[in-house]
Amino acid sequence: MSRDRGRSTAEWTTFAASCVVLLVVVGLIVVQMFGTSTSPAPVAEIRMPYRVEAGAFHVDVAVTNRGDETAANVQVSATLEIDGEETTADQTIDFLAGHATQHLVFVFADDPGGGTLTVSVTGYSLP
Amino acid sequence: MTRTEVGGADPGLRLDGAGYCGAVTRSLDASLPVSAGPWRTELVEVVRAVSGGLLFGVPLLYTMEVWWIGSHTEPGQMLVVLAMSTVPVFLLNLTAGFRSRSDVRLRDAAADTAEAVAIGLVVTALVLVMLREITLESPPVEALGKVLYEAMPFCLGIALATHLLRGGRIQPDDEESTGEDESSGKPDDRLGLPATVADLGATAVGATFICLSIAATDEVPMLAAAMSPEWLLVVVAASLAVSYAIVFVADFSKQQQRHAHQGIFQRPLSETVAAYLLSLVIAAVLLWFFQRGLTPWSDGLGRVIVLGFPATIGGAAGRLAI
C-alpha cells in the first residue's frame, strides 16, 4: 500500500513525539556548543567510615571531575603514614567525564585510624 | 517509490502495477487483522521498529570502548554522529523502512526518518539505563554522547526492519505450504523437523551467533557486577518482553502461522519462556567456553542473565530466519 493517501492521526502523533525527541537532543547539543566549558579538574575525597573485610581495611574514595571536559588516565594515589612509615597504593581511572564521579576502594593492612591517610589525584591526560 | 515483495496468490496478495518489473506484490498489512485500527497498526509498526533496532544494535551496546568514546565527545562531533545516523536511514527508508506501507513521497521518507532516529535514540537510552551505563548520576553530556554513538546501528536496524526480516522468509516455492499452514494451523515441518525442535534449534543457533562476539569480552562481567538483584530482574523481564515482541508482535515473518501452531511450546507465551531458558543455557555454555567464570553462583547467574539479553534477541532472530 502506498503512502499517497496520507498519514493517519496515530502516525502524526508518532511523528510529533519523534520531533520533540530530536529537538531536545539537538537543543542539548547546541547548548553545549555555545556554552562555556572548563578544563578537567578531578578531585579525590575519602568517604568515611572505613570498612574491615577479611582482616584488611577498605577505604572508599570518590573521585569527581569538577570540570566540564573529560579526563583520561586519571592517576589516584593513597598514602597511609603510621609512625613515619608510609604505605602507598595507586589506581587509574580510564575515563572520567565532566562532573562524573567514580568510586574506588583502597585496601590497607594497617588501620588508617591509627595514622594519617591522604588521597590525591597525581595526574591525568586529555583524551 | 513503491516497495514490492514477490509472493504467490493468497488473499493477502494484490497486483500493483506501479511495482518493480510489474511483479506480484504482497500487502504487508496482510497479517494484521482487517479491523485493526490505526492506533493498533501504529503500535505494531513502532514495535517492529524497536525490534529491528535491537536485532542490529545490541552487539554494539556491549562494547565498552563505545561507552568511553561517547563520554568524551565534543558537541560538534555529536552533531556529525547524529547526521551520520540520519542520512543512511533516510536512504534506506526510500526502499525499506519499518512501516508496512512504502514511502511514495520524499517528505514521507523524511518523516519516517525522523521517527526512526527518535525511536533509536529513545530505545538506546532505555537499554543503556537497563545496563546501568546511564544512571541518575551520569552527567547529561556523557549520557548524550553514549546514546548518540550506540544509536547508530539501532537506527540502521530500524530502517532495515521490513527489508531484511519481514520478507526474508517469503520465497516463491514456500507460498503454497504457507497458505496451507496458515489455514490448517499445522506445525511448520518444511525442514522435516517438528516445529518445536526447529524453533529450539534456531533459537540456539541465533543466540550462539549473536553471543559469540560478546561472551569473551570484559563487558559482561563488568555490567553484571554493577547490577543489583533488582536490576537483574528488570533484565529478565526486558529479555522476555523483547523476545515476545520480535516474534509475535512486530509482524516480521509468518506471525499468523506462529500464533496458529499447536503444542505446549508452540503457544506464544510458552514458546517465549522456553526460548528464553534455552538462551540462558547458551549464554552459560559460552561463558564457560570462554572461561569467563560462572562461580560463585551469584556472580555466574548475573553474567548469564546479562548475556542472556543479546542471546534472547539472537534466538528470536534465529526463529524468524528458519
Image: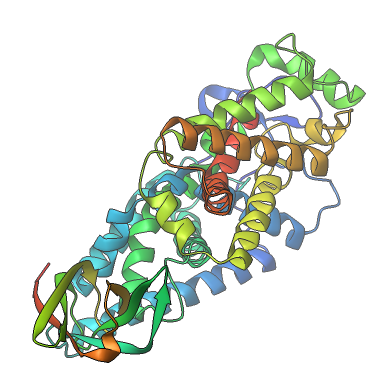
Of B73 and A15, which appears nearest the observer? B73
Of A97 and B80, which appears nearest the observer? A97
Q: Relative to B154, is B71 above or below?
A: below
Q: Relative to B68, is B302 above or below?
A: above
Of A48 and A127, which appears nearest the observer? A48
**Residue B183 in the image: x percent, y percent?**
89, 25
| Residue A21 left/right relative to B186 | left
Decide if residue B46 is in sight here.
yes
Question: What residue sits 57% from the left and 42% below the top?
Answer: B313
Quarter of the image where one finds residue B254: top right
* Badge count: 0
Question: What residue sits 20% from the left and 68% below the top?
Answer: A91
Q: Quadrant of the C terminus of chain B?
A: top right
| Residue B230 left/right relative to B10 | left
Of A120 and A64, which appears nearest the observer? A120
- Colour scheme of this structure image? rainbow
**Residue B70 in the image: x percent, y percent?**
28, 64
| Residue A69 left/right relative to A3 | left
Q: Relative to B158, is B128 above or below?
A: below
Extreme-front residue of the structure = A83
**Residue B173 in the image: x percent, y percent?**
67, 11
Question: What residue sits 8% from the left and 86% below the top?
Answer: A84
Quarter of the image where one finds residue A65: bottom left
**Residue A44 in the image: x percent, y percent?**
22, 85
Decide if residue B62 is in sight here.
no
